Structure formats: structure tokens, C-alpha cells
Image (tube, coloured by chain):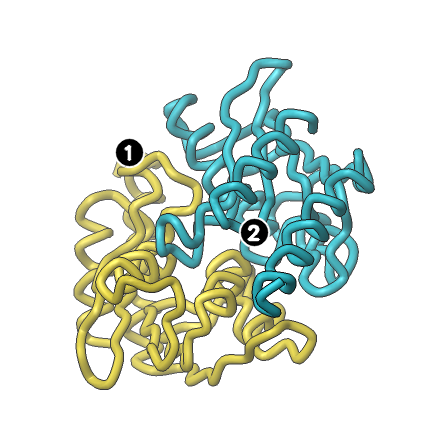
Chain colours: A yellow, B cyan
Amino acid sequence: MRLALDEARRAAQLGEVPVGAVVTRGGELLAATHNRRELDLDPTAHAEMLAMRLAAGRLGAWRLTGCVLYVTIEPCPMCAGAAVLARLARVVYGASDPKAGACGTLMDLVRDPRLNHQIEVVPGVLAAECGEVMREFFDGRRTERRGG
Amino acid sequence: MRLALDEARRAAQLGEVPVGAVVTRGGELLAATHNRRELDLDPTAHAEMLAMRLAAGRLGAWRLTGCVLYVTIEPCPMCAGAAVLARLARVVYGASDPKAGACGTLMDLVRDPRLNHQIEVVPGVLAAECGEVMREFFDGRRTERRGG
């Protein structure tokens, strides 16, 4: 999660909403990246999506069986849906997202028994730090808008 | 939807689960593509995702405001979540998906009032043909497996 936090801070420096994500398997680092929606002009370029795509490229397989996703903010419905499709073993996240969190907060797509795969969830890891990176980013943007 | 069906049939020829998708705005075609999960070894490479990414690239913006997604099969949670993030105006789909449909069948993410955008849904357009392309594909795979 420390590495995901580093990625989130990198995103903030680039003007992106600061979310960082890492994918590992058996202790091996497969991918570490951050949200790139503005940089790539791509509505799907959330940190988790890019990390899963990078990991799949690294493994040469779309099934990320046995893989763990670490992400600084609770995944949204798109990312949670992708995690199910990718057959991730576990999602470890930092701060909860009351507005769009789809791993237990607003809804719980990754443990929906009607879908064809369920994922273990570990919430709240370094939650305060992960949330703080977001708060600082949005506070900074508000200050900018006020011309401060 | 005819164009999306052509794309689905192209996917089947390539050994991909045959789902096709098209994005338009104001009658202009922005993207037409199909599922490429196996070809790209990418768990996120559903037809809808690729079509939205192509359309965003074409428009030079991640917000697909005013855009319509046509897709042969009801979008899954990942694709429905992406459609909300992309601010699509409308989703038009062919056959419903009782196993993972997230635009009104198994769940309804695109009209969830708790999320920050809602999308108009037009279900059942050329549903029989869209479903038939899927059935033929899976029947063919079962026959192959039996060595028939």
C-alpha cells in the first residue's frame, strides 16, 4: 500500500485525482500505476484498471488468478466489475468511498454471489493517509479556483 | 445496432465471445469495435470499453456527453460503471444478460440515483439476432469440445 500511496502522490503532481494502485502475485510486483484519466483523455483510465491491464500484459493472460490489487481508495463500480472479470483473489483498499465505493460501502459488487467470481476484501489499510492525499488535492483545487 | 451486430460477428470469427459495440454522437459514428479479451489478453477489453475509449480518443475528451452506446448484449457491471463515468446520454442494447446484465436485468447501475450520473436505457433492440449470434458461438464451442 505504501507503493500505491507513492503512485497516488505522483498522480496529484500531474493534476490527476490522486489514486494509486498496485497488483502483486505471490509477493511479486506485477504493476504499479495511478489514475491517468486527464492525461490519457480516457474515462476508463482509473488506477485499478490500468494496473490490472499492466499485470495481465506482464502475465500474458487476462485471468489474474491469485493476484492481489492494492488501491488507495475503494474501487468504483467499473473497477470492482473489472476485478471480478479478472478473477482477482483479493482487493486491499485504503479509504472508503461513500459516493461510489463498490467493495462494501455504497454497494458490494466483488462479493455479489450472483456473479461468477467473488473476491476477498481487506478495507481500511492506511486509510487515513490515503484519504488525506485526496483531501489535500481537492482542498488545493478549491483554493486555486478562489484565486488563493 | 446493425453495425454492432456486424462487429459481433467479426468477433466470433476471431474466436472472441461475440459482442459488438458502437458509439455515436448526433448521428456521427465515433467508434465501432468488438470484444477483444483473448486477442489483447486484457480482462477489461469488452466491446463497450474499447468503443468508449476509441470515442474519447476521437473527441479528445474523456466526457462522452451526448453520446449513445449501442451494444449487442446488455453491459456487465464494469461496462455499465464505465458508461456512468463517461457521462453517456443513452445505452441501447440488444439481448438481456440474466447472468451479469447491469442495465436493468441483474442490477441497474446506469440508473442508480446514488451515482453522479444517470443514463437512459433502450433495451431489446434486435434482441433475437443479438442473442442468436451468442448462442451460435457457444453451441459451436460445445460441438468443438465434443470433437464434433
Task: State the image quarter where residue A5 is shown.
Answer: bottom left
Question: At 46% from the left edge and 83% from the top edge, which residue is drawn?
Answer: A121
Q: Position of residue A45 (x, y in %)?
A: 36, 47
Location of residue A100 with respect to B17 vertically, above or below: below
Task: State the image quarter where residue B120 is shown.
Answer: top right
Task: Tell me the quarter of the image containing the C terminus of chain B.
Answer: bottom right
Chain bearing tag 2 is: B
> For the residues marked 2 and 1, what is the alpha-carbon distance in whole angstroms?
52 Å
Task: Tell me the quarter of the image containing the N terminus of chain B.
Answer: top right
The residue that disc 2 covers is: B17
Task: State the image quarter where residue A127 is shown.
Answer: bottom left
Graded by Cα atoms within 10 Å as few (under 14), some (14 to 19) or many (20 or more), the crowding at tag 1 reads few
Q: Position of residue A13 (x, y in %)?
A: 17, 49
Classify residue A28 as left or right of residue A41: left
Question: At 23% from the left edge and 51% from the top edge, which residue is drawn?
Answer: A12
Location of residue B116 with respect to B71 vertically, above or below: below
Chain bearing tag 1 is: A
A110 or B124: nearer the viewer = B124
**SS of the residue at dot 2?**
loop
Classify residue A119 as left or right of residue B143: left
The residue that disc 1 covers is: A147
B128 or A49: nearer the viewer = B128
Location of residue B96 with respect to B93 vertically, above or below: below
Give the label, 2 or 1, closer to the camera.
Answer: 2
